[in-house]
Image (cartoon, grey):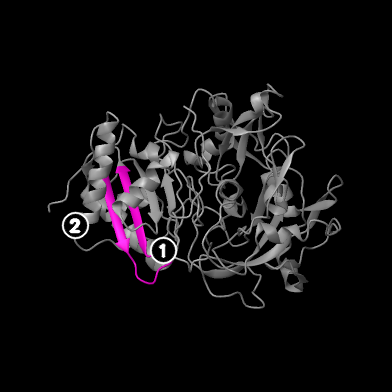
Amino acid sequence: MLYVVLRFIVAAGLIIAILPLVSVWASSEDDSHLQRTWARTDHPVATGRVNRTWMWGPHEHIQAFVEPYADAPGGERLVHYNDKSRMEDNSYRADEPPWDVTNGLIALELITGMMQTGDTSFEQRAPADVQVAGDPHPNSPTYATFNSVLDDPPLPVGSLITQTIDKSGDVQNESDLELLGVTAEHYVPETDHTVASVFWEFMNSSGEVYQHGVFGHDSLFESPFFATGLPVTEAYWMSVPVGGVLQHVLGQCFERRCLTYSPGNDPGWKVEAANVGQHYYQWRYIDDVPTDDGDDGTEPDPTATPQPTPSLAPTVTPQPTPPPAPTATPQPTPSPAPTATPEPTVTPLPTATPTPAPTATPQPTATPTLASEPNCLNAMEREFLTLINEYRQQNGLSTLANSEALNIASYNHSVDMGERGYFSHDTPEGLSPQDRAEIAGYPHGTGENLTAGRNTAQDAFNAWRASPGHDDNMLFEGYETIGIGRAEVPGSQYGVYWTTKLGLVEDEAPTC
């Protein structure tokens, strides 16, 4: 089944949804070549056979759907948004791997604001004011930042990289960064830029891959530029908070992705791709809609993801969803809470212990505080339970039982988002929805919907019903139970936060 994404004209409500955690890919018969491309590098990661960064992301951002493209047959093509990129069906031009699936030039689109709608057609928008790496921070560089350095001259091959960039695009030099030993290594004449040594090594690396149904050793990328495209900027050190600690992170943007290098990370996670797929989806489908400035009482926007299908790999890692900013479709990016404003200088030396990557990291490091008593539904939450069960009955589906464990997980997440000022399926420490469900005592597969700024059960229900992915979650026939958590958090950005967690196995009901 294809999921057609509708553009939301939203003045109210931030919503986010996550797929059930029983698969790493929601497959359809139409996207097998996209699935094959994902599996080649990320199936070994998903199954725990290797400890390295994701090339696409642990899960899909949203199921494959048809997106307009002027020069594709019929003016549209199948696409699939992942954390790290967007896969595009290019089989009408190339019928052999790897080029039957392409990455969009979406990093360049985010930087320039030129949204590509065909081979030679574009729609001008504002460059994306979305942070490239690190925890949310008002002074961290964004994609728009890199617009100002597209024409900077290339660094000489072999020179040590010591240049820094801040959000305003101001480029400075910090000689102490020579100690990190990163050099400009590979000059690309087509774009007149030089690839940093750490990124060139990554782009030419090899390791365990999964192809033709078996694991083997091969180059991770069939071509060094297959996943990234050509470089469109030089590499710059950025001072960004990571895990609450200011660090120097090297960033370089290419046509298709922006890569980051965090010296203090574990070896397999030093180089990562920014969550360009998530950021682009938000920019293309959400951020062109007027949004509030945080002071006018308007609310954040929905996001959604689809139902489970047979697992490609024996894993229960969760499906990602969009970034914490207002969004209208799936997958969040784990993003720790804001930290103090960067100081003028930060020591460039790696920290003694590995810190979380500036993009999604698969390992949780902390647990949220659980409700002290079994969480029974209040009147507003009971009203939502009635609404969703009536809706399911109207569509020929069974009603959902109420789960005490999922109530606790839902309520605690709603409170945590409000108190710590984030909006995401993953906590600032990297705990996924499945982690949170298991901590609360529910070990089975789950899906999750989030929204904020909506006061009543009817408001939350209406918003999710109007969002295709959220609606798919509410109407997925495999769910048997639900947890509901509505939290009022005075002084928080949105005031009211809703979390619903839908479970595949019925468990103990509240003793209320």
- Residue 207 in the image: state x and y as whole percent: 62, 39
| Residue bearing the label numbered 1 | 494
Q: Residue furthest left?
A: 512
Q: For the C terminus, which image quadrant?
A: bottom left
- Mark sitting on residue 266: none
Q: Is 184 one of the magenta-colored residues?
A: no
Left or right: residue 447 versus residue 170 is left
Secondary element at tag 2 = loop
- Mark sitting on residue 374: 2
Check the image and report above or below for 394 versus 256. above
Q: Foreground: 196 or 158?
A: 196
The answer to which of marks 1 and 2 sits earlier in the sequence is: 2
Q: Which three-letter amino acid code belongs to the residue tagged 2?
A: Pro
Q: Is residue 21 visible?
A: no
Q: Is 499 one of the magenta-colored residues?
A: yes
Secondary element at tag 1 = loop
Residue drawn where x is 33% and y is 47% of the image: 461
- Residue 375 in the image: state x and y as whole percent: 21, 57
